[in-house]
């Protein structure tokens, strides 16, 4: 993944949800429900209401609530589908503009290998992933382990490899995903051009960038 202003601007331009989308869904839903409920009540449910049997009336209300929810989610899916078709061409055009941007001859983007571990640290797997032939690569261990044995293994690995960074989430929430979010939105924000997420047992090809 890339972390640069061009990508950020492009992403916000294309994928940002417009404030009119959800009101549009709500308006369409309300209009359809008014027509639907009127005809259903007039033609099918009026005798039940006239009977004044509480359980029958309750079942009708519960049924209509579920029907309304299905209508709402269905309309939402249709609106999002049509919106995607509308932005698909703009997305392709923006992608082409990014690809055509000139790069300096000496541009060497920084890669980070984000190794995530939660009580499953495998030193030889990480060692293999670190053997890259691209020099501007940094390894970061994101450790949320609770087991003292694995914590000690991670500490020893970092001690033996001074160039490796170690980040632990003090809140220790949501295991690997929590520490990854903690890093990308915290101390790691803006420290890379691209990053690669590695699971504890993952092996990586020895070429990141030609």
Image (spheres, helix red, strand yellow):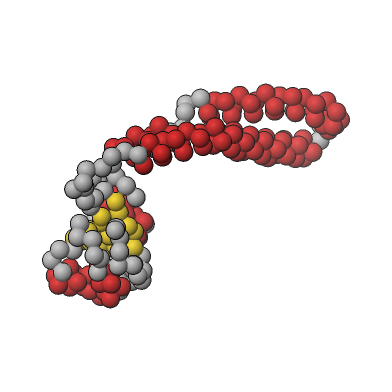
Q: Residue at x 29, y 45 (%)?
A: 3
Q: Position of residue 204 (x, y in %)?
A: 34, 67
Q: Residue at x 38, y 36 (%)?
A: 97
| Residue 40 drawn above or below residue 106 | above
On the rendered structure, is 33 left or right of 111? right
Quadrant in the rendering for residue 124: bottom left
| Residue 60 drawn above or below residue 106 | above
Q: Residue at x 83, y 25 (%)?
A: 42
Q: Position of residue 123 (x, y in %)?
A: 26, 74
On the rendered structure, is 141 left or right of 20? left
* Residue 191 appears in the rendering: no
* Residue 131 appears in the rendering: yes
Q: Which one is in front, 209 or 86?
A: 209
Q: Which one is in front, 68 or 91?
A: 91
Q: Position of residue 38 (x, y in %)?
A: 77, 24
Quadrant in the rendering for residue 43: top right
Quadrant in the rendering for residue 128: bottom left
Q: Which one is in front, 17 or 34?
A: 17
Q: Residue at x 81, y 35 (%)?
A: 53
């Amino acid at each position: 993944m890339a972390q640069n202003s061009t990508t950020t601007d492009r992403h916000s331009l294309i994928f940002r949800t417009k404030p009119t989308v959800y009101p549009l869904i709500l308006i369409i839903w309300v209009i359809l429900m008014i027509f639907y409920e009127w005809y259903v009540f007039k033609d099918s449910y009026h005798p039940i209401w006239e009977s004044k049997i509480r359980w029958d009336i309750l079942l009708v209300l519960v049924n209509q609530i579920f029907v309304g929810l299905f209508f709402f989610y269905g309309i939402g899916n249709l609106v999002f589908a049509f919106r995607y078709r509308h932005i698909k061409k703009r997305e392709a055009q923006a992608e082409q503009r990014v690809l055509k941007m000139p790069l300096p001859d000496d541009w060497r983007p920084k890669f980070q290998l984000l190794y995530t571990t939660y009580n499953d640290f495998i030193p030889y797997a990480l060692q293999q992933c670190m053997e890259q032939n691209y020099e501007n690569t940094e390894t970061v261990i994101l450790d949320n382990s609770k087991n003292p044995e694995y914590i000690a293994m991670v500490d020893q690995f970092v001690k033996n490899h001074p160039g490796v960074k170690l980040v632990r989430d003090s809140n220790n929430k949501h295991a690997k995903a929590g520490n990854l979010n903690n890093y990308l939105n915290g101390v790691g924000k803006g420290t890379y051009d691209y990053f690669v997420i590695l699971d504890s047992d993952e092996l990586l090809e020895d070429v990141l960038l030609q």
